[in-house]
């Protein structure tokens, strides 16, 4: 899970130079939303892995929040509701508003997010481990392994994320990597259609590219090199107590060379919550662990949401980034190395290496789906 918080794991502001690199405001911006949610399944037998992105604005039943029953909210908000509820409860019980209380509240946020995602995905999907990455940790990771190779089929600029990319194969640094995975609009070309879901595509491309690059450099098999990367980011990442990052990194060698299939969970459309927040409506039937016949998760007037002092902000009517077009069914088909748009893909050492396809901007996505995927275009 990737948090949108602009503070470190102790809740302290980041250095000024890091805020400049993040191009995302300062400590007063953001909250504890899990803006990036991705489930990675790595089979023990070495067969093809699967990466599933969960759109952050999916409107679901939030569960696992201390002192509260299930209620409707965006899936990304479970962390923040859990954090706020736990911190409020601890302080009301006489606990000091100190780091111990803060860390306990963060743990409650993680548990609520994991419980909500688990319930959303269904009983057949079990989460064994988790990795929490803040914006600072992502930037530090990108810095440690830069330059990173990406491929973009059309030049694009965005003043919100700081994105400014030429067309074609290129190497980017840590600051540019931050813009690459956060961009969801183009502020120079009104005909350049984006949606919030484009972020998932770029995040998937980034992970595939980095995995390929680290394997080529021998980092996965060199404990010293791998430890150096982990040391650079360890202060701003959190993992469960049973997850060994070195072992996980070594397992990641199986994710290169096209041995991972990325997909994004489908949505059925855009909508509004009773509070006026923009949401994704979803069909639970299409979740990987649910059986047919499960009712749709849609906005209702009775949310059951607790009244918690959360600072989460949502895109409202007329704000940039809210989708307005109806989603259409998109089948992710196509032969390896062929761009489904008909454009010539970026060249690479191996046409089967999907890490070379970053921003293809195609109506069809060349991903290997678990099922037909519905995506949207703003």
Image (spheres, rainbow, N blue to C red):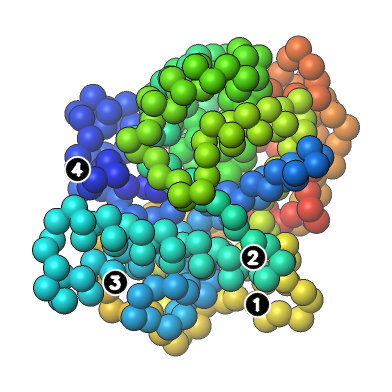
Q: Which mark is residue 296?
A: 1
Q: Is residue 28 left or right of residue 196?
A: left
Q: Marks 3 and 4: CB-CB under 8 Å?
A: no
Q: Which mark is residue 121?
A: 2
Q: Which residue is mark 4?
A: 12
- What is the spatial separation of the Cα atoms under label 4 and label 1, in whole angstroms? 40 Å
In primary-sequence order, the first of circles 3 and 2 is: 3
The mark lying in front, picked from 1 and 2, is 2
Residue 211 place in picture, x, y as percent? 62, 26
In primary-sequence order, the first of circles 1 and 2 is: 2
In primary-sequence order, the first of circles 4 and 1 is: 4
How many C-alpha atoms fall within 10 Å of the one at disc 1: few (<14), some, or many (≥20)?
some
Q: Which mark is residue 85?
A: 3
- Mark 1: secondary structure: loop
In primary-sequence order, the first of circles 3 and 4 is: 4
Residue 204 place in picture, x, y as percent? 62, 38
Residue 12 place in picture, x, y as percent? 19, 43
Q: Residue at x 18, y 53 (%)?
A: 99
Residue 151's quadrant in the figure? Answer: top right
């Amino acid at each position: 899970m990737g948090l949108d918080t602009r503070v470190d794991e102790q809740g302290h502001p980041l250095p000024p130079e890091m805020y400049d690199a993040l191009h995302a405001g300062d400590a007063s911006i953001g909250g504890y939303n899990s803006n990036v949610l991705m489930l990675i399944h790595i089979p023990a037998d070495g067969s093809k892995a699967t990466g599933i992105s969960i759109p952050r604005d999916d409107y679901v039943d939030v569960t696992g929040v201390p002192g509260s029953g299930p209620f409707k909210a965006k899936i990304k908000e479970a962390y923040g509701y859990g954090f706020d509820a736990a911190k409020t409860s601890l302080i009301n019980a006489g606990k000091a508003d100190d780091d111990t209380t803060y860390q306990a509240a963060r743990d409650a946020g993680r548990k609520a997010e994991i419980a909500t995602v688990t319930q959303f995905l269904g009983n057949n999907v079990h989460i064994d481990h988790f990795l929490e990455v803040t914006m600072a940790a992502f930037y530090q990771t990108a810095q440690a392994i830069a330059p990173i190779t990406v491929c973009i089929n059309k030049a694009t600029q965005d003043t919100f994320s700081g994105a400014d990319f030429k067309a074609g194969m290129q190497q980017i640094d840590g600051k540019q990597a931050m813009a690459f995975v956060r961009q969801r609009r183009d502020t120079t070309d009104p005909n350049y259609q984006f949606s919030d879901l484009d972020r998932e595509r770029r995040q998937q491309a980034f992970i595939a590219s980095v995995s390929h690059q680290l394997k080529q450099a021998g980092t996965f098999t060199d404990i010293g090199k791998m430890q150096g990367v982990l040391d650079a980011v360890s202060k701003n990442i959190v993992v469960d107590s049973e997850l060994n990052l070195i072992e996980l990194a070594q397992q990641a060698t199986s994710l290169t060379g096209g041995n991972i299939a990325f997909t994004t969970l489908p949505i059925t459309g855009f909508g509004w919550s009773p509070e006026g927040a923009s949401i994704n409506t979803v069909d639970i039937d299409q979740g990987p662990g649910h059986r047919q016949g499960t009712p749709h998760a849609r906005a209702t007037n009775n949310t059951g949401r607790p009244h918690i002092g959360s600072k989460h902000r949502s895109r409202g009517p007329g704000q940039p980034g809210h989708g307005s077009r109806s989603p259409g069914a998109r089948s992710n088909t196509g032969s390896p190395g062929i761009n489904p748009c008909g454009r010539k893909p970026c060249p690479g050492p191996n046409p089967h290496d999907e890490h070379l396809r970053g921003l293809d901007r195609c109506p069809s996505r060349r991903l290997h789906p678990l099922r037909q995927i519905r995506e949207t275009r703003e």
